[in-house]
Image (cartoon, rainbow, N blue to C red):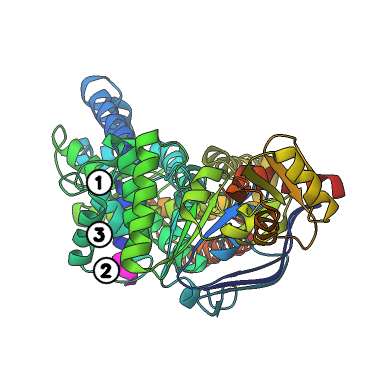
Amino acid sequence: MFFLQLKHELWKLFGKKRTYIGFGAFLLVQLAVILMFRYTKAAGAIRRALEGGGYSAVDFLTAGTIATQIVIPVAYLLLPLYVTLVGGDLVAKETEDGTMRMILARPISRLRLLTLKWSAGTLFSFTLSLILGGFGWLLASFWFPQGGLFAIQIDGGGPGGGFAVFGPAEGAWRYATAHALLATKAVTLLSLAFLFSCFNMKPAAATILALSVMFVNVILMNIPWFADYKSWFLTHHLNLWQWMFLQTTPVTRMAESLCLLFGFNVTFFAIGAATFQVRDIKS
Amino acid sequence: MIQLQALRKLFGQRVAVDSLDLVVPQGVVFGLLGHNGAGKSTTIGMLLGQVWPTSGQLLVRGFDVIANRKDALAKVGAIFEAPVFYDYLSGWRNLEILASYSALTPTKRLSEVVAWVGLSGREHSLVRTYSHGMRARLALAQSLLPAPDLLILDEPTNGLDPEGIHEMRETIRRLHAEFGLTILLSSHLLSEVEQLCTRIAVLHQGTKVFDGSLAEATRGSNRVRLVTENFPEAVVRLQNAALVTGSDGTEFMTLATGSTTAIVAKQLVEWGFPVHAISREESTLEQFYLSLVKKSSSIR
């Protein structure tokens, strides 16, 4: 019965056109970035960095490298926008539209309903992250060859200086794992928007609040004087996916961040569910 | 079928429903009357477990709605004013989704209900292409899916055109006649209640000001219409006999306490007045409702 209800939640979610805005935007951005690398001199900087480090540009200026360049800005800006848009809708939109009253006229508990909605949102987040990765690589393959992977290290640095290089198999594996971990960022931000969505507010307000919380974290985390306290901020742990592109994977740090993200998700869901449970649902 | 005891709901400091006791027996069409803001929708919200009561007890089908909502609502259907659906999905998909929140519903049951409400042939169209009337039928279909014992209708004719209102009224009659459903109909449209309900309760500012049969409500005052020869003289003699207290001078008079039309008719015949017609004036539900609300407001 749970899976039948979940299937119906997915029908509701994927039946809406706005659910696909994220997918469409990702495709456009990916195409634009790939074409810029292909038909401008932008790839020259990557070539110089590679050759300066003693690597062959032929081996590493590849589909995987270009796809990795795309995911970084998308994961920082577009992904949070689209998952919070969907997360903010999950409960608040149904309440605003009046369909929530129709549902709650039936003998389903509020907790079960929220579990269904959150599960549907989680599946959406995973799909979005994996499609982002899959399409990025696929589109880049039309203009760039397969081969090794070159990634600029954004967070942490480590052995290898400012960038890391991986062979074709390891590069592909790291790229895939990074996107699976990127889904944990998407799910957590969706859970945050879902939490606000359970309060008596408009869907847009829930989305804006979730994004605000994220941006406040980003701002605080990036103040140089707070560098020692980076691990206090949610966004620091949300970025664990990019540690897959470090030459040496910080497994312990990633495990710690995964545990914390799990805790954040449980907390966001619990607060949202408790709030929704005590609310009066009226037209 | 429904039992409310000392039900009270506060929204902040505002009293939405106060000390409401109500019994809706099985098999009746029960009207919940009141103007906008009287507390009807809040009461229905509490009945469905959508609004938490501040205090009091709610039993639906013998089950406590707060403690055992699942059993209480297992065989309950509900329609709200201006029914809302997932417009971007088909009517059929909407029914599948809503049915799954109650129980596993076979496709055959869905088809039966679609046919019963007259949506066959359009059930796979997107709801956004439906007219108001078709949406009302879809709302009815979803409420019938769990094979309900109790149907709760909150302002079901709001937004419908006269033809739609007529259709909805006939459907409610059919539901009651064919399936023997208990129906709780909330409305501020007095004519609708008058035509459909056998028992009513009137809410005013969150308080119940009347609860009884429609016949009791429309029995009216002690005014009696009398058609006889020489009406003024008949009235004088009836006044002297302390059977009436006054008249309008043409054909209406007011009965004294303890007097009835039968006693008056018998007395007039004994006195030799031909009685062509005598009947107690029936007030309309509208007159009754307005007088009730006026009285209640003056007390407050």
The residue lying furthest to the front in this view is B272
- Given residues B58 and A165, the one toward you in this image is B58
Nearer-the-camera pick, A53 or B232: B232
Front-most of residues B180 and A35: B180
Give me the residue at 47% from left, 77% from top.
B71
Give me the chain letter of mark 1: B
The magenta stretch is A1-5
Q: Which residue is mark 2?
A: B105
Q: Is residue B157 magenta?
A: no
Residue A233, which numbered label?
none
Question: Closer to us: mark 1 or mark 3?
Answer: 3
Circle 1/circle 3 CB separation < 8 Å: no
Labels 1 and 2 touching (C-beta < 8 A)? no
Secondary-structure class at tag 1: loop
Going by the numbered disc 1, the residue's amino acid type is Ser
Query: Mark 3: which amino acid?
Result: Val
Judging by the rendered image, the residue that carries numbered circle 3 is: B113
Q: Residue A239, can we see it? A: no
Establish whether labels 1 and 2 are both on one chain. Answer: yes
Q: Are marks 2 and 3 on the same chain?
A: yes
Query: Picture coordinates of residue B153 (x, y %)?
Result: 47, 54
Q: Are the residues flagged by discs 2 and 3 in contact, CB closer than 8 Å?
A: no
Is residue B1 among what the camera can see? Answer: yes
